[in-house]
Image (cartoon, rainbow, N blue to C red):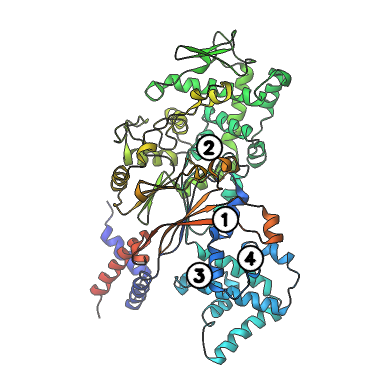
Amino acid sequence: MPNYAELYETLIKENYPTRQALQKETIKLDSILSLPKGTEHFMSDLHGEYQAFKHLVNNCSGVIREKISLCLSDLSKEEQDEFATLIYYPNEKLKLISNKNEDWYFKTIYNLIQLASLISSKYSRQYVKKFIAPDYAYVIDELLHTKDNSESNIREYFNNIIKSIIKTDASEEYIKELCKIIKSLAVSRLHIVGDIFDRGSHPGSIIELLKKHHSLDIQYGNHDVLWFGAHSGNQALIFYVIYNCVKYNNFSVLENSYGISLRKLINYSKLLYDNSENVINPLIKTTLILLMKLEGKIIKNYPQLFNNVSLVLNNIDYNKGTYHFNGKDYILKDTNLKGINYNDPYSISSVEEDIINSLTKDFKNSPRLKDHLNFLISKGSVYKNYNNNLLYHGCVPLDQSGDYKTVYTPSGYKKGKELFDYLDKLIKKVVNNDLTDQELDYFYYLWNGFDSPFTGRWYKTFESNFLSDEELQIEKRNPYYTFRNNKDVCERILRDFGLNDSSHIINGHLPVKVKDGESPIKADGKLLIIDGGFCQAYHNKTGIAGYTLINNSHGLRIKAHEEFCGLDEVLKNNKDIISETKIIETYQNRLTIKDTTEGHNLKIILEGLKLELEKNKA
């Protein structure tokens, strides 16, 4: 057993070898605790919508434009719009601006310094320097900290720095660097509350963008868990991924982004079906039948998880073209079903086995997919307590009484926080590919389970594709989705996860139907839903194009975004995403670093340093 006291003393001596070093660090930490809390942005359910997400990262969900209006109110609206676009896309916008003379460069750099100074004012000078590339650090630091000086010689010094930048043909380099600094400092931390994958066509590009973010955490969504399971070799989930890609016409996600070939599956579908004989797309139909065969094995093996789930292929009368359910027969929309042994519907042919094995190999061995999923796991967790908020994507499984539901896992029955902690450890095992067969099967339930914390419902994939009766397509949800409107239930969840009654739950997963009058604010403000239908497939259902929740030192507010107009419109006409702001909570006293999770950790360190100073008094 290590001697922690001795280890602590060694670390103190290595990092702070002198009393002066101890004093310096103590002064620094004590001062930092009094600075305003940084700005956090929360987004969820990105679903591969890269261009819109990138724009909101660049415009900091409208915060940059707000700061420009505050700081540079002497500029006209048109000038402010162009200035904002320059900050969002400096490389592209600089190429399009035609009036770039010395006066333009001076005014632009001057205005960028004003804005950077405003945004950096809540941070320590040392912290700001971390975001400035070394080659620009001296000059930009001087500009940021001499701009407001009333002495004429200092003002001349400030102006001459900018003039010298222009004379040495370094203007555009400094403009780009200042734009980068402004965007980095405007948001101190980004939280992605689940679902980067599926529907949209560029989840990989989103992950590459997230890799560059300076401060980030991710809470896994059900669509992320789907890809974790597929990459680990769960064959039913592999075909669910393929189904989602085919349904939304996103073949490129698999074939171009991750090198997963669908050629064998496509050829098999063409062999089975003549397009003229089908109601359902032949490739979707082929994929679904293989999916149902593969999920059937899991359903049969785990009655404790799927006791109320029908084996749909057994309920089809293939001669009549009907589906039997709850004592009633329903006519199938498409009765042309191939590749099924009517006497043994769940049997898999040798041709199908070859296709399945080939796809399994591609999913498990794709280097880029492995890299992206490992990154998500390195930055991710099932839930997170951060700055007095509880973040998770789906639900805390509840029973009909609003109590925690005890859920089966490969490690025994668990509920509430214990269940979340278990799942966090389970998902971490994906990185080293050391899941047991039972654990790998369990990922199917995490994706498609009534009591799964990621999903909280059983998908009616067969019914929505093959049956016209809308009642059969209704997906029943875990009682959590009713009780999330109950303040007492939300406060109990917060307490059980280590927070207090003044905290909030921040939730994604189910889009808020704003157009129907639904509010993202539930349970008297205890629970906030930030899924506003970011992906294009949901815009008509929600009436907006996503939310950003913003938590700064003054309070909580949520921004509802309109649809992204496209990069060409932004660059040529300085169009921005229009966002409507709603105040959720205003703090009575402005929050400082000492009120945050980071501040809690700093206070522990500070107390240790103060004790060392007491022990080492001269």
Q: Amino acid at mark 4?
A: Asp
Q: Please name which of the two marks, 2 or 4, marks the residue nearer to the observer.
A: 4
Q: Give the labeled residue for mark 1.
A: 56
- The picture quadrant where one finds residue 409 is top left
Residue that badge 4 annotates: 81
**Local crowd size for mark 3, using a 10 Å CA cut-off: few (<14), some (14–19), many (≥20):** many
Q: Residue at x 63, y 75 (%)?
A: 109
Relative to residue 19, is residue 164 drawn left or right? right
Work out whether 79 lies above or below 349: below
Q: Picture quarter containing residue 308?
A: top left
Q: Which residue is mark 3?
A: 119
- In primary-sequence order, the first of circles 3 and 2 is 3
Give the distance between the C-alpha atoms of the residues marked 4 and 1, in whole angstroms: 15 Å
Kindly indicate whether the residue at mark 2 contacts the one at mark 3 (C-beta within 8 angstroms): no
Element type where label 2 sits in the image: helix
Specify which label sits upstream in the sequence, 4 or 1: 1
Left or right: 8 in relation to 311: left
Q: Secondary structure at mark 1?
A: helix
Q: For marks 3 and 2, give the CA distance.
A: 38 Å
CA separation in Å, label 2 and label 4: 40 Å
Q: Which type of secondary structure does the marked residue at label 4 adopt?
A: helix
Residue denoted by label 2: 227
Q: Is residue 77 left or right of residue 330?
A: right
Ranked by sequence position, the earlier of labels 4 and 3 is 4
Q: Residue visible at 51% across and 30% down?
A: 234
Q: Is residue 566 visible?
A: yes
In which quadrant is the C terminus drawn?
Answer: bottom left
User: Which of the labelled discs sits on residue 554, or is there none?
Assistant: none
